[in-house]
Image: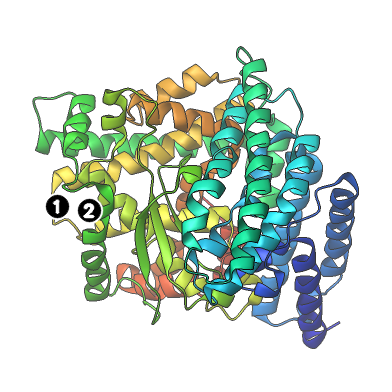
Amino acid sequence: MGRSDWSRFVTSFLGEYFDLNPTFAANAGRHEYDGRLPDWSEDGLRRKIAWLREQRRAGAAFDPEALDSQQRLEREHLLAQVDGELFWIAEAEIPWRNPLFYLLPFDPANYLTRNYSPLEDRLRAFLSYARELPRAARQLQENLRPDLPRTIAQFGRAALGGLGDYFEKDVPPVFASVADPALQAELREVGGRAAAAMREVDAWFAKREEDAAEREDGFALGRDLYTRMLYESERVDLPLATLEAAGRRELERNLAALREACAAYAPELSLAACVERVQADKPAGGPVDAARRQLAGLRRFIEERELVSIPGGGQALIEEAPPYQRWNSAFIDIPGPYDGHLPAIYYIAPPDPSWSAAEREAYVPGEADLLFVSIHEVWPGHFLQFLHSNRSASEIGRLFVGYGYAEGWAHYSEELMWESGFCDGDPRLRIGQLQNALLRNVRYLVSIGLHTGGMTLAEAERMFRELGFQDPANARQQAARGTFDPAYLNYTLGKLILRKLRDDWTAPRGGRAAWRDFHDRFLEVGGPPIPLVREHLLGPGSPGLL
């Protein structure tokens, strides 16, 4: 089987993948799949596992030597995508253990915030989606085990429980200008049933949370599954001891840089007090307005320094996160490759109103911290990376952008801007960059500790406070995230692998002078696991992943 056979296989694979994952397809911009939700029944999940195994066999049957270099990378990328999904579903049993599995399909943002078609058409699509929600909500409750750990039940409630109120209060105004009275009546009826279904989900998670009040264990993957997670989803095949040592070196490197920056900024203060002073400098007008002010200067700097190419088109808007999406402090929603003409939305979450006044104030990022969040999310982080990936020559690369690739690039971007001269050496802004870096470094070590080393939630929270310099509310949130998102080590892991690849690729090509060429070569492939990009750029057997 040769090149044309591979192209036909990819087309067949994607068509069947979209049928099994219709919300993925719709979010990618294939709007013939609008309004459909996956089948999470026992039979539906069994069919999905069987299909993935069959696709794995079919993809592996292609001889790499019969393919061109892009197709060889695409083959390895497809196999890694399939292996990662098989790992999470069949081995880690995520549909039965973790509400994270259900997050994207339940999210209605595709119909509400993306202007891909006239509002009336999007209302019809939303109604189709809302009709399916009660069935999907029942399947979620039937699948998830009743003895969820407390933090995972809390996450499920935070991520999905707010949808009931959102459907009732926030969705109708979005479609208020649709003049068709029959559609408006249907929205009230169908939206009401969807809201009721999601309130049942909220109550279900609340009961799980109550039952698990004293139960904080039961989330750990264990060493074997954790090691398999790293290989099956990221193609990282290194001993845990090697990975942990690399993470500790990176933490110490950034702590040393923080000591140096604080010695210049506030030599009379301890590290914690120094970071606290920087964090107390809140952005005027709030973080949303401040982030809007930051973006133009970030883009201008990238262009002036020629750090990386910026493809034409694309716009990033900034909004406050809606109530049902506030389990993460900041994130960006980027339209898929078939909707590339639409703007992305960079969301910033306000503090939880149930927190104390002091916790709410501390949660709001300082100006310096926020600057590097904006770098991470937009320029030259996620938004720029997706401007490239959405134009990749590989359809697999455009559609499947991996966790380690996306977050590794975004985290790498933060330090890239600093070391390229952004901020003019201002120690206050350097502290903002390092605060973001240390947060990701602690995630890396906490993930390994929680899932393979017997670390407790209290120990993880303390580590975020003492080594990540997080406020109490953020420290709690970040430690809890480690229980349901063990792969959040990928921020630092991806950055470490990417930085080593950059140094190895540019060394014989002029070093720093070749950074722009390297960044463009790295970004053009889409989003495979970074070890596969390393092999693509340097050849097979290139040593020294870290």
**Residue 414 occupies quadrant:** bottom left
**Closest to the observer, 417 or 475:** 475
Report the side of 228 relative to 449 (left or right).
Answer: right
- What element does badge 2 sit on? helix
**Closest to the observer, 179 or 465:** 179
Residue of label 1: 425
Distance between the alpha carbons at the discs numbered 1 and 2: 21 Å
Q: Residue furthest bottom?
A: 4
Q: Measuring 48% from the left and 51% from the top, which residue is drawn there?
A: 170
Q: Is residue 189 above or below residue 369?
A: below
| N-term mark: 1 or 2 | 2
Q: Is residue 224 above or below residue 522?
A: above
Please provide percent x and percent y for residue 433: 28, 46
Q: Measuring 56% from the left and 53% from the top, which residue is drawn there?
A: 403
Q: Is residue 527 above or below residue 419?
A: below
Amino acid type shown at disc 1: Gly
Please provide percent x and percent y for residue 41: 85, 46
- What element does badge 1 sit on? loop
Q: Measuring 59% from the left and 41% from the top, which residue is drawn there?
A: 160
Report the side of 140 relative to 252 (left or right).
Answer: right
Amino acid type shown at disc 2: Ala
**Category of crowding for the residue at label 1, using alpha-carbon neighbours closer than 10 angstroms: few (below 14), some (14–19), many (at least 20):** few
Residue 290 circle label: 2
Q: Measuring 32% from the left and 28% from the top, which residue is drawn there?
A: 471
Q: Residue furthest top?
A: 214
Please provide percent x and percent y for residue 288: 28, 52
